[in-house]
Image (cartoon, helix red, strand yellow):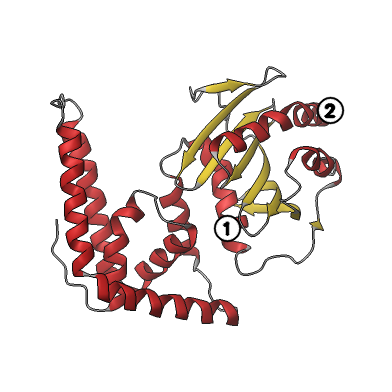
Amino acid sequence: MTQTRFGDQACQKVLARLDSYLDNELTTESTLEIVEHFERCPVCMKEAQDRQSERTRLRTAVREVRVPPGLVGRVRDRLRQTRETRSKRFHVMAIAAALTVCFGSWVAYRLGVQRLTTAAQESYIAMTSRQVAAIMRVGLGDHLLCAVIRQRTNRPQVAVDNLPAEFRELIPIARQHVPGELPLILAHECRYHGRTYVHLTFRNDRNLLSLIVARKENGESFESANLPSTPSTSGVPIYAAGVGQFQVAAFESRDFLVYTVSDLPRQNNLALLVALSPALQNLLDRMRA
């Protein structure tokens, strides 16, 4: 791996969290901070790329090797010891860096100037969604861009209903099953990578949930993607995936892909779409007719 020198406290903080970033273990805010730092610091970006490349090479090299009994446990113990040693070394600097960055982020947020460039947005979305199948990224990507990034500094104060007339029934359908403590804050059409999405956003102080409908493109199908599924009461297969804090559940009609994407527990997110699927399927079938 390339040996680099990290010259300031911001770089020290990124270095300390880099492995967690590559494993998608950080919160959304922490991940976005690192993406923003990469835009300013090509040295840290190169270090991240080198670590990711080394992980890929290692996975390729050991794919056909049988792991001896007990090896995994010994490796994990050694990694834990290494991280504890590194943590002690950087403890004081990490505290100072965290205080500095948190205060700066708070000021930027209060002034309304904390924004990501388009390149940083794409980097964050690609980094977060790379571990799920391409057809799952359709809904996850729109959730990340519209609900996580765009609304993080410009949250609507009241529910806004800008849905096309044919999708107005989505709101009463969703309200029958979405928990009452998750209020609807936005219902609209949005675009990402030239594709139009119908997007309902539900949010409180703890959780964020999106209900997303997108018209199929280029023969898209969950069935052809060979993903494992869970049958719903209506017989519609429901597909699920997770990456980091985000959980994705999805199903398809003849013409549409439907997603719930949230930071709820996996089973809660899946159960919600299972409950929604009969009414949503009926609505989409009537639109086709």
Q: In the figure, is residue 179 to the left or right of 78?
A: right
Q: Position of residue 282 (x, y in %)?
A: 80, 26
Q: Nearer the viewer, residue 244 or 143?
A: 244
Q: Which residue is mark 2?
A: 286
Whole-number angstrom distance, CA of label 1 to CA of label 2: 31 Å
Q: Residue at x 19, y 62 (%)?
A: 86
Residue 222 visible in rendering: yes
Q: In the figure, is residue 92 to the left or right of 3?
A: right
Sequence-first tag of 1 and 2: 1
Q: In the figure, is residue 225 to the left or right of 250?
A: left
Q: Quadrant of the C terminus?
A: top right
Q: Position of residue 135 (x, y in %)?
A: 53, 35
SS state under label 1: helix
Q: Amino acid at mark 1?
A: Val
Residue 193 visible in rendering: no
Q: Decide: is 69 above or below 34.
A: above
| Badge 1 density bin: few <14, some 14–19, many ≥20, Cα 10 Å | some
Q: Quadrant of the N terminus?
A: bottom left
Q: Residue at x 57, y 56 (%)?
A: 145
Q: Which residue is mark 1?
A: 148
The image quadrant of residue 254 is top right
